[in-house]
Amino acid sequence: MTQSLIEKITGKKTIIVQENERMIASYQGRVLGFYSSGVHSLPNRDHSLEYTIYDLNQPVFSSDLEKIIRRKMPRELERHVFIIVANDNEICIIKNGISVYEVLMPNTERLLWKDAGEWSIQKNVIPNDYRMDAKVVKQFGLEQHVLSITTNENEVCIIRNGNLVYDVLSSNKECLLWKDGEDWSLEKLIIPDDCRVDNKVAKQLVVSKKASLLVTSTIESYEKGILRIDGIIYPPLEAGTYYFWNIAVNLTVKKIDLRRQTLDITGQELLTRDRVTIRINLTADYTVEDPMMAVSVVKDYQAALYNTLQLTFRKTLGEMSLDQILDRKFAIGDETMAMVRAEMKSIGLEVHNIDLKDVILPGEMRDIFNQVVAAEKQAEANVIRRREETNATRSLLNTAKVMADNPIMLRLKELESLEAIAAKVDHLTVHNGTEGLMNDLVKLRSGK
């Protein structure tokens, strides 16, 4: 009663704040400030004093006057309250002494009474890839804030953030992702022996710009694809686009062209039976009939065909003389066909045609052959010339005999000769008549 009377007379109110308490008071709508433990006499004439006492056992600061205090008395606020802000992609570990009091999430703020504990903070930046360090997670007890992912042998895990593929975790891997505020989903898949990826999953990876996780191979309609993984060959791939996991395996896709192909062998030197060095050019047409055999029996089927053609022609032509080679040039390919075809059949190739395109002689030998050919042609020309001369002489002799036996024929011949001469001159004078034309002097005078 006495205390109330004193407060009424003085217009003040006495408030006791305990050791574990703090107080915020306002009078007539104006914030008076923060008050620590002790006895405080505050104005209250019209009973407009308002105050709030806070228990420090509840260290979080919360007040309806917070905005006014921040604006009007920021220094006073900082003297009594510990303001902790976690920025974007940042978490704050709040410790009270050595114990973790709270983990502050990104873009959040916490206000704590400074006198409520021995406060310290440790800020950790959340990586752009959201991957958290296991030691940090364990140290600060962040297990509830992370997504733990583990994959087994021959297993991959597709990690999606919303509708997009975030990453693919390969076999025997562990990953911790910060999950607060993120829409994570997981899809675990068993890796098949051939590492094939379903086309739907592959397209999702491509759209999410994760094509580097794939090995892509497109087989054309005229091709077969031979898949080899760590030395194991799988059945041929038909035409289409195939996707494979780009994991720690040695994976290759060899494309085999099934169309008819041509192999040329040029400038092969060899020694004939009569010790003449020549160079030859070959060509062969072939197709791959058995792709599996072509890649498994030999390392390089084209090189095998090349060597077989080379050795076969060396052996065949080495047993022939140069004249035989030149005479049978177009038949040699057919003769070697059976040997080459049988050997190539054993590695999955079908040889269609083999042709000896060119036989190239050395320079001096070519000159000799040119001389021989020229001499042969000259001799043939001489024979033809002599034959024509003989025929012409025989024809003249027969004509003379006919004229000797037939005077009329001779007279006609004379007239033909006269006609031919008259066609070449302007005037013709004939003496003694036409009877003496062939026996007397014929004078030709040109008119002036």
Image (cartoon, rainbow, N blue to C red):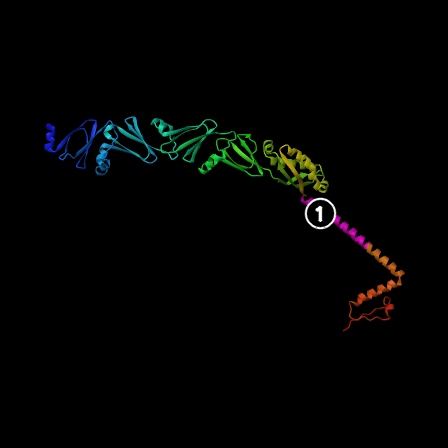
Q: Which residue is label 1 attached to?
A: 370
Residue, x 54% and y 34% (percent of image)?
253
Give x and y (percent) for residue 132.
Answer: 38, 31
Give x and y (percent) for residue 163.
Answer: 42, 36
Q: Is 379 part of what is drawn in magenta?
A: yes
Residue 307 in sight here = no
Residue, x 62% and y 37% (percent of image)?
287
Residue, x 38% and y 28% (percent of image)?
134
SS class of the residue under badge 1?
A: helix
Residue 414 in sight here = yes
Give x and y (percent) for residue 90.
Answer: 33, 34
In the depicted structure, whether residue 323 falls above or below residue 387: above
35 lies left or right of 314: left
Q: Amino acid at mark 1?
A: Asn
Q: Nearer the viewer, residue 383 or 344?
A: 344
Give x and y (percent) for residue 190.
Answer: 48, 29
Q: Which residues are magenta?
A: 362-390
131 lies left or right of 3: right
Q: Quadrant of residue 188?
A: top left
